[in-house]
């Protein structure tokens, strides 16, 4: 799962949840995909080496390779989102770090905070939000549907346990 709880040794310090997007293609796989694309693009060009046809096909193969490179790099940069939820008995604080460096923060009293699961009507199915402090914020929108369902259960249980203290 692309999220993990970290418990503090001091019970008053609470717990911290870190969420990050799933990486389906690790960096070594990125290199393999680019190399494979290059090899498969060059394979048909072996038959036309030394002819004018090569110069007609080569730019399009290079454009396709550059497009794949740019798309994969963009995907990696967009996947650098990090959400951190710090839950103590007095405060719940959500910090979201965007790929380009922007930081968004939200905090509330855990006793008044509600975790909500929106099965439909959100940007994604089974959209998880936190409501409290006069605002409603999303959490884990980049997770898969099953991961958001599990996150919802985890958050409800943690908030219930914290509110019971």
Image (cartoon, rainbow, N blue to C red):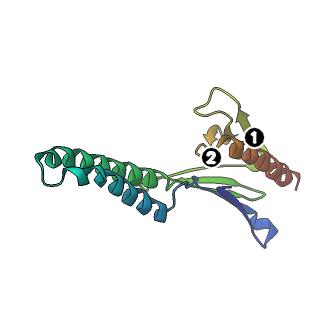
Quarter of the figure that contains the N terminus? bottom right
* Circle 1 residue: 114
Give whichever of discs 2 and 1 has the lower sequence position.
1
Q: Is residue 77 left or right of residue 15?
A: left
Instruction: Using the image, tell me which numbered label, if any, was put on residue 26.
Output: none
* For residue 36, above or below residue 136: below
* Circle 2 residue: 143
Q: Residues within 10 Å of mark 1 (few under 14, many from 20)?
A: some
Residue 151 is situated, as x and y percent measured from the top left of the image, at 73, 48
Quarter of the figure that contains the C terminus? bottom right
Q: Residue at x 45, y 55 (%)?
A: 76
Q: Nearer the viewer, residue 146 or 35?
A: 35
Nearer the camera: disc 2 or disc 1? 2
Q: Nearer the viewer, residue 158 or 40?
A: 40
Q: Residue at x 41, y 62 (%)?
A: 31
Q: What secondary structure is found at the residue carrying circle 2? A: loop
The residue sitting at the top extreme is 121
Q: Residue at x 25, y 54 (%)?
A: 46
Residue 100 is situated, as x and y percent measured from the top left of the image, at 41, 54
Q: Is residue 136 left or right of residue 103?
A: right
Residue 81 is situated, as x and y percent measured from the top left of the image, at 52, 53
């Amino acid at each position: 799962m692309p999220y993990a709880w970290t418990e503090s040794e001091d019970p008053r310090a609470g717990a911290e949840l870190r969420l990050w997007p799933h990486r389906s293609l690790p960096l070594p796989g990125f290199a393999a995909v680019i190399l494979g694309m290059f090899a498969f693009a060059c394979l048909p060009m072996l038959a036309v080496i030394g002819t004018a046809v090569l110069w007609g096909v080569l730019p399009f193969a290079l454009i396709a390779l550059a497009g794949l490179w740019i798309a994969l790099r963009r995907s990696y940069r967009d996947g650098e989102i990090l959400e951190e939820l710090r839950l103590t008995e007095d405060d719940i604080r959500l910090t979201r770090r965007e790929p380009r460096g922007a930081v968004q923060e939200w905090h509330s009293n855990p006793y008044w905070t509600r975790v909500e699961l929106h099965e439909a009507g959100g940007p994604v199915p089974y959209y998880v939000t936190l409501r409290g402090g006069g605002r409603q914020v999303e959490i884990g929108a980049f997770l898969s549907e099953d991961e958001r369902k599990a996150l919802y259960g985890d958050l409800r249980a943690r908030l219930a346990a914290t509110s019971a203290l």
